[in-house]
Image (cartoon, helix red, strand yellow):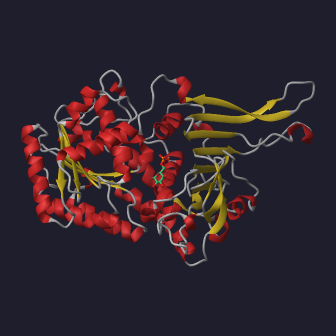
Amino acid sequence: MSTAEASTWHNPLRDKRDKRMPRIAGPCAVVIFGVTGDLARKKLMPAIYDLANRGLLPPSFALVGFARRDWADEDFGQVVYDAVKQHARTPFRQEVWDRLAEGFRFVQGAFDDDEAFGHLAETLHTLDVERGTNGNHAFYLSIPPKAFPQVLEQLSRSGLAAKDGDSWSRVVIEKPFGHDLSSAEELNGLVNSVFPESSVFRIDHYLGKETVQNILALRFANEMFEPIWNAHYVDHVQITMAEDIGLGGRGGYYDGVGAARDVIQNHLIQLLALTAMEEPVSFSPAELQAEKIKVLAASRLAEPLDQTTSRGQYAAGWQGGEKVVGLLDEEGFSQTSTTETFAAITVDVDTRRWAGVPFYLRTGKRLGRRVTEIALVFKRAPHLPFDATMTEELGKNALVIRVQPDEGITLRFGSKVPGNAMEVRDVSMDFSYGSAFAEESPEAYERLILDVLLGEPSLFPVNAEVELSWKILDPALEYWASHGTPDSYESGTWGPESAFEMLRRVGREWRRP
Ligand code: BG6
């Protein structure tokens, strides 16, 4: 970040003015590559409308779609309209829509079409003058990674990657950031040869979730959690991201990628970093990143990998009362696909705070229900002055951060069951966002797109974090590649038997969220 940028920069995590004086983006244009894809339709276009509806986009805002379709600006406008009508979070308001739609442009072309990029540059320059976007451009690459090099090269060649005077040019990259450490290094090298790191915004949409940002508030704004947030009290940590949906139709992206690369490498390892890191000196992006990088550098897979990891692929089963097919019968997957739809790993964090405390990370499709949570499971009290029969139903204390759905925090602890006997059983104390706050949480993409436009980097993983995450995961990927195929699990259950065995072997069990 230049000194000029730094002096006008407001830290989103420290910025108390959000409500009194909302942070509004300055004049700019957003260009979406991959405008016909699912992400653009379901998340990006609705988020842009929601930002406009919340008054967070300037009048001088433009949205440019780039794709091969033979569309006029109006056709593109219709696509955005349909996406907004179907997926926007906030109510539709005609006047907001009309103002926003005036800034829609479509550029037709393929990624190898020099002329189309020339046309894109002209379109942006015209918008700069006519709509007042002032040369500020964000390029959102919502495209398959194999297309990154070509688009980056074109942005560089057409001069669009370069800043002009006070204006800015930023690139937004969707995952996957490579498929292992060496490909990530190559990709980062390529990106940084066109854009300086301060202009690169890598999206990990989990970091845009309110509940994920709240991990830092919970830990560092309170006195009562941090003293027990360590190996003296914590037995182990479970980070779960479970989905009930299957993968029909997503084969093109998912086949050959799998659950570990799709979710563990990014979302779950970021959750681990926020849970395990030390208190940052401040919430400046550099200080935050420094702490995340430190804890990731201290993290590694526990071994032996045949006992500390598990992977599975869903077979047919029942979900929500309906019969569903297995992965191999889903549209877009071959009958011989060995792609895992469930993955679990054990990570050791080699620091004084966490020595001996395993972090279990698991994710999967077609599991029992959709839930993401981080559970700190505490050790048992060193001494229980009760007869064993009195505490038969007492489990381990747990602090559970409910990332989604039903966002909030649960504390599990033992309580006396009413009655004459001293019988102790687990109970829950709940904090729920829904009942504690009147404000509805914005969608992760609203927050992240706004931060890109404001040039606020705190919620975007930097190069080093991405590479360290691959370094942690790579040994499991290599091990799996040379050791058989994923275990099968029935749709609607909580994963393959090997995942249960992974914890049972060490005297623990997965929480049933
Ligand atoms: C994406 C993954 O990053 O996250 C998808 O590629 C997954 O496979 C999605 O379904 C889940 O996001 P969320 O916000 O619904 O938990």
In which image quadrant can residue 17 be found? top left
Residue drawn 41% across and 56% down? 465
Seen from the viewer's position, the closer of residues 55 and 81 is 81
Seen from the viewer's position, the closer of residues 256 and 227 is 256
Q: Position of residue 159 (x, y in %)?
A: 11, 57
In the displayed structure image, the side of residue 16 where residue 366 appears, left or right? right
Seen from the viewer's position, the closer of residues 256 and 136 is 256
Residue 459 shows in this picture: no
In which image quadrant can residue 37 be found? bottom left
Q: Position of residue 255 (x, y in %)?
A: 47, 67
The C terminus: image quadrant:
top right
User: In the figure, 77 relative to 359: above or below?
Assistant: above
Q: Position of residue 503 (x, y in %)?
A: 71, 58
Seen from the viewer's position, the closer of residues 344 and 43 is 43
Residue drawn 17% across and 49% down? 72
**Residue at the far bottom in the pictured view:** 482
Residue 209 shows in this picture: yes
Q: Position of residue 207 (x, y in %)?
A: 43, 45
User: In the figure, 10 relative to 187: above or below?
Assistant: above
In the displayed structure image, the side of residue 57 where residue 182 appears, left or right? right
Residue drawn 74% across and 43% down? 396
In which image quadrant can residue 408 be found? top right
Question: Total marks drawn?
Answer: 0
